[in-house]
Image (cartoon, rainbow, N blue to C red):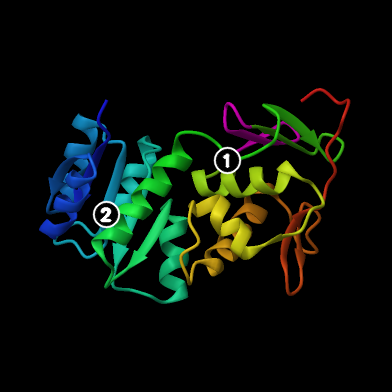
Amino acid sequence: MSTTVLVVDDEAKLRDYLERDGYTVLEASDGRTALDVATSSRPDLVVLDLGLPGLPGEEVARLLRRNSDVPIVMLTAKASENDRVMGLKLGADDYVVKPFSPRELVARVEAVLRRSRGPRTETTASASYGAGRLRIDTERREVHTGDRPVDLTRSEFDLLAALASRPGRVWSRTELVGRVQGHTFDAYERTIDVHVKNLRHKLGDSPPSEVIVTVPGVGYKLGVERDPDRPA
């Protein structure tokens, strides 16, 4: 079955390159049309330009995230860290800064789709950590702190699952980019810090953090041990 990508942009080359790689491509030139097409056609991934006429791309992403877990690759000319932080908070799975090559975008799309089709983790299907304080179910992609469910984006879940695959093991930002983004393109290590900040907030892991621990000059580790005999 062909993979369908909705391109919300006016760049014809993007469609050509995606179709050349075997994707079925749907197009929308404005935000309202994009929401209608996404609702009716349920694409496998959305490539979303933030510089849209009418309804801003940021609002399109926000509305998509209300009812859908569809992967989103954002396109923008805004390269500041604050802009990337905002894109990730809106639920973007990747954030591509213009100018970029169409070949790079296709590689990003492939990487995001790989991640969306299965967790890149060695954890068992369900496991408990820190005397039951944290529970991760990789098959259902669910996380609980105590009895409270935690709503995570796909990238946040993949990051937590990577850390939990080997509790106590220190992961560099470069390694985590590969696990979360599916690639190691330059300038994306800072996105890991954004995901960690969001994760800590959602897990209630207030400073000094005990669940996701910063290792200065290196990266991060899961600071709670897995419970070997405790049912998840």
Residue occupied by mark 2: 48
Q: Is residue 58 visible to us here?
A: no
Type of residue at label 1? Arg
**Left or right: where 159 falls relative to 40:** right
The quadrant holding residue 131 is top right
The quadrant holding residue 4 is top left
Residue 183 within the magenta-colored segment of the rendering: no
Q: Compared with residue 85, is residue 149 higher up or lower down, i.e. above or below?
A: above
Residue occupied by mark 1: 120
The segment highlighted magenta reads: 138-150
Residue at the image point whose x is 48% and y is 42% from the top:
115
Mark 2 / mark 1, whichever is N-terminal: 2
Residue at the image point whose x is 78% and y is 33% from the top:
128
Q: Compared with residue 27, is residue 84 higher up or lower down, i.e. above or below?
A: below
Q: Which is closer to the viewer, label 2 or label 1?
A: 1
Q: Position of residue 77 (x, y in %)?
A: 28, 73
Type of residue at label 2? Leu
Q: Position of residue 7 (x, y in %)?
A: 20, 49
Q: Compared with residue 79, is residue 179 higher up or lower down, i.e. above or below?
A: above
**Left or right: where 52 falls relative to 82:** left
